[in-house]
């Protein structure tokens, strides 16, 4: 299957069912809600609002799922990138519990949308966080107790022999297994959401980058070819915002992440690597994450770049990282190699709320966006419909801009990440 020319090359693009190209915006149109970004967040909000009877227009700079929604690792995990301890410290235990319960709703919503709209995105149950160092194993075991006692969320500790029964790697000291999390084909899911939104009456305009947000009294999103005037606007551009809302852009950092897809291994060899077909992620700061594809490849992600530049000799680096986990794959070639940006906030907590009374936003998913983006779309839709209590809980999370401004924030972050990588390597 040949991917449309506008899609970044990846195994996802090569294997996903095509989506009919949508027109570019031409002229001025009216809508009840206009949304910037046809990724998971924007499409989820559009779908919820259209089902409630709103006229919705979505503006996408390139194609549906072109950004992180169509390129990510596909791992859907309960919770948020910052962890519950950070939320407890910022908001207290009661609010942290409410936020975690909402993340569980996001997981349920993800499954429900896949089932309701018959999205063929290869959903698989099961996810494991795996420690490399003894201190990480101790911390994970404490987390299991806290999640059970404070959040009524059952997780399983697998010792090394139990893990080896499912994962054919000697690298890890055990695992926290979560049967309620899982993984999917990201681009298939994005396109499935788009099909559902189109069927509900949403108008999606591709190849229509937004150049200006006019905020009040009635928001307008302007492109080179026209503009949409609406009662409400939603900013869901995440790492790809460019000059639309500086106060949002200063509070996220685009971070490059990279994924390799090996040549097909064959069913028996692939399932020998991960017998229960779960997704796996280690808990290093610069983490590795991996899973199997439907055509029996290993999809292996890692080697994050905080400098906005691709790492040198990326293919060689990814081959070494794969060999460190699965030395038995040393001679297996890499067929696909791609990357993209995810958006991280300074505290790794989600940054959702209002820019003005009529302009909503969601960003800062910090590597946990597969499930939480759908929740963000639902909560923004609820707020537009007049029920904002649940979105307001996220708006209470404090967010500071990255230090250093636009010029210095990247070098400062690179230095900080170098320290965390050294810590991972030494203890």
Image (cartoon, rainbow, N blue to C red):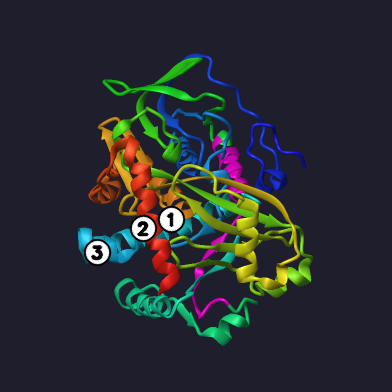
Q: Are marks 3 and 2 in contact (CB under 8 Å)?
A: no
Q: Is residue 195 magenta?
A: yes
Left or right position of 175 against 215: right
Whether 64 is drawn above or below 316: the answer is above
The x and y percentages for residue 378 are: 40, 46
Q: Position of residue 163 (x, y in %)?
A: 57, 81
Q: Earlier in the sequence, mark 3 or mark 1?
A: 3
Residue 221, picture quadrant: top left
Q: Residue at x 57, y 60 (%)?
A: 183
User: Please, what secondary structure does the residue beneath circle 3 have?
Assistant: helix
How far apart are the two marked residues, 1 and 2, measured between alpha carbons?
6 Å
| Disc number lying in front (3 or 2) | 3
- Specify the segment rendered in magenta: 171-197
Choose between 108 and 360: the one closer to the eye.
360
Using a 10 Å C-alpha cutoff, classify the residue at mark 2 as few (fewer than 14 neighbours), some (14 to 19) or many (20 or more): some
Q: Label 3 belongs to which residue?
A: 88
Q: Kindly identify which residue carries mark 2.
A: 102
């Amino acid at each position: 299957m040949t991917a449309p020319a506008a899609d970044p090359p990846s195994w996802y693009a090569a294997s996903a069912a095509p989506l009919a190209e949508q027109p570019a915006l031409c002229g001025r149109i009216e809508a009840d809600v206009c949304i910037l970004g046809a990724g998971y967040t924007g499409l989820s909000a559009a779908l919820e609002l259209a089902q409630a009877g709103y006229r919705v227009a979505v503006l996408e700079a390139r194609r549906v799922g072109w950004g992180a929604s169509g390129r990510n690792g596909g791992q859907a995990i309960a919770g948020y990138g910052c962890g519950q301890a950070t939320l407890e410290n910022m908001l207290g235990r009661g609010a942290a519990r409410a936020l975690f319960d909402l993340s569980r709703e996001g997981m349920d919503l993800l499954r429900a949308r896949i089932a309701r709209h018959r999205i063929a995105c290869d959903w698989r149950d099961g996810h494991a966080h795996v420690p490399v160092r003894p201190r990480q194993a101790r911390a994970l075991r404490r987390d299991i107790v806290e999640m059970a006692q404070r959040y009524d969320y059952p997780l399983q500790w697998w010792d090394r022999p139990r893990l080896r029964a499912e994962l054919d790697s000697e690298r890890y000291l055990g695992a926290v297994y979560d049967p309620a999390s899982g993984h999917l084909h990201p681009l298939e899911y994005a396109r499935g959401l788009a099909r559902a939104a189109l069927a509900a009456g949403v108008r999606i305009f591709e190849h229509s980058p937004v150049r200006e947000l006019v905020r009040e009294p009635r928001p307008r999103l302007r492109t080179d070819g026209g503009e949409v005037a609406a009662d409400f606007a939603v900013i869901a551009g995440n790492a790809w915002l460019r000059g639309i809302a500086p106060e949002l852009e200063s509070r996220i950092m685009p971070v490059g992440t990279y994924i390799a897809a090996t040549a097909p291994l064959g069913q028996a060899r692939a399932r020998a690597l991960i017998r229960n077909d779960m997704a796996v992620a280690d808990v290093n700061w610069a983490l590795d994450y991996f899973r199997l594809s439907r055509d029996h490849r290993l999809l292996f992600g890692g080697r994050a770049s905080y400098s906005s530049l691709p790492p040198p000799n990326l293919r060689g680096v990814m081959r070494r990282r794969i060999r460190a986990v699965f030395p038995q794959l040393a001679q297996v070639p890499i067929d696909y190699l791609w990357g993209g940006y995810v958006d991280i906030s300074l505290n790794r907590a989600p940054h959702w709320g209002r820019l003005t009374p009529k302009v909503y936003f969601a960003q800062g998913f910090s590597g946990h966006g597969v499930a939480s983006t759908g929740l963000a779309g639902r909560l923004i839709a609820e707020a537009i419909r007049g029920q904002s209590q649940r979105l307001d809980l996220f708006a209470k999370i404090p967010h500071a801009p990255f230090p250093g401004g636009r010029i210095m924030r990247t070098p400062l972050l690179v230095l900080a990440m170098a320290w965390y990588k050294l810590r991972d390597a030494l203890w």
